[in-house]
Amino acid sequence: MDTSALPDTEHLAERARTALGRCGVGRLREPIGAAGVARTPITGQILFPVEFDTAASAERAVTAAHDTFTSAWRDTPAPVRGRLVHRFGELLREHKEDLAALVTIEAGKIHSEALGEVQEMIDICDLAVGLSRQLYGRTMPSERPGHRLMETWHPLGVVGVITAFNFPVAVWSWNTCVALVCGDTVVWKPSELTPLTALACHGLLMRAAEDVGAPADVHRLVLGDREVGEALVEDPRVALLSATGSTAMGRAVAPRVAARMGRYLLELGGNNAAVVAPSADLDLVVRGSVFAAAGTAGQRCTSLRRLIVHEDVADEVARRIVDAYKQLRDRIGDPFEESTLVGPLVGERAHTAMGAALARARADGGEVLVGGARWWEESAADAYYVEPAVVRMPGQTEVVREETFAPILYVLGYRTLEEAVELHNGVPQGLSSAIFTQDQAEAERFLSAAGSDCGIVNVNIGTSGAEIGGAFGGEKDTGGGRESGSDSWKAYMRRATNTVNYGGGLPLAQGVRFL
Ligand code: UN1
């Protein structure tokens, strides 16, 4: 494919305007204070200017969300709150193509993955609507006669949601749909790289609020960079800060929220690995690994970055993956093109990081088996299309232990499962992991307490593409937070323990006697 097949920026800007208009975003915001732009990694160029927020306007957004929380939303019955999310889900179904187009334009994601991301939003709406009738508390037997002991879950307050460019809409929706049914109000700061998808989501949510009669300020959008994010981090009215991004960002945010006794929920870097046992079905290994490592151009938190392969099958696995990667070469390019499997990197920094990591890997004795080249450097100088790379490493050196947010797959060898698990867990991050094996006992050992130390542990599938029904998040440098399904909703509520005396007497707990 040559660059003449890349769409031009004006065409993409027009497409973005149409999608925004259909999502109810007519004008690109009133003047607020800061000049921002919307860009596309497809050409690397600016689409059009967008008004960004300032710290002061972000503070006003928190005030509005906080007032709405105390005056209306926390007292609205949870199933009624669920109606807002139900209506939002309907609008997402109607505007799936529009939102996916914006995701492709701003994040460079191939269209099928962009549609998948919007589907993930629709799915979380369904889950959250069900949840709105299932915010269960427990009752426990009291040790005292004539007493009842129970717990109640209450809304928490304003939830600040900070999201990253790579999942510009789904991760916001995991947080927001659950927070809204839990009775919280939300202030969202998306990545400064994806303001348009955020405007479209906010527009649709506002339409849903109008349709069901919910207050508009249950959700506020603030656009901008660090200064705007910091306003949410510092504001004591933001009861929970849910942030997705790099480990460095998490390390900066967590102590500041903790210092004001706020809560935080962090979803940070991953350095995800799959162990390939000698009994593994190698067809599954190749298909699972190529999607997980090269899909989304290696820019998922859950992307596969390390393949830990038993020495008996290492050569064959490497050869077959390299063959598959060679086929990917014809499928790099315009993410709107149906045949494309690998779209652009988000920008120059990602490309520089990829080049630096490959150079370090080579210096450590690694052999680049395939990939790494940049395409159209001359003709599309602002866009970063790269061939996904596979590197055979002699060991787990420092560069392998770091997360490089680009399509590099390191292949390492092992002899015993113990050694594989040690390599697997021998990195600072702990998000997603997998084992490919036909040996049930081996799979169980990997799933056990002495196995993978990650928040997500899979068998015979890759590391990426988790469903919303499970809790999503990871351990160690990944930050420890859990979002999305299972009982993750509890992070968005506060628990009250209630003891009710209906017996007339006043027996004290633990048999204490007094007066
Ligand atoms: C992320 O990369 O931040 O599991 C989220 C997955 C997607 C979500 C990834 N459902 O790959």
Image: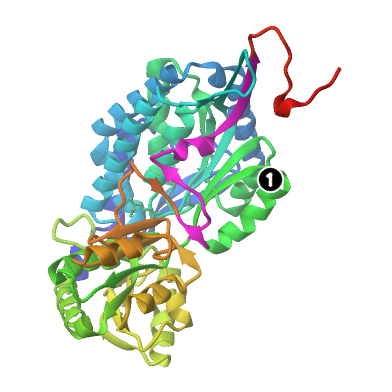
Q: Residues within 10 Å of mark 1 (few under 14, many from 20)?
A: some
- Identity, as a three-letter code, of the amino acid under mark 1: Glu
Of residues 53 and 415, which is closer to you in this image? 415
Q: Quadrant of the N terminus?
A: bottom left
Q: Which residue is mark 1?
A: 234
Q: Look at the picture and state if 370 lies above or below 297.
A: below
Give residue 14's position: percent from left, percent from top: 29, 45
Q: Is residue 490 magenta?
A: yes
Q: Quadrant of the C terminus?
A: top right
Q: Residue at x 65, y 9 (%)?
A: 503
Q: Is residue 268 magenta?
A: no
The answer to whether residue 65 is left or right of residue 321 is right
Q: Look at the picture and state if 123 lies above or below 268.
A: above
Q: Residue furthest top?
A: 504
Q: Is residue 247 visible?
A: yes
The answer to whether residue 17 is left or right of residue 503 is left
Q: Residue at x 59, y 54 (%)?
A: 226
Residue stretch in magenta: 474-500
Q: Is residue 303 visible?
A: no
Of residues 284 and 190, which is closer to you in this image? 284
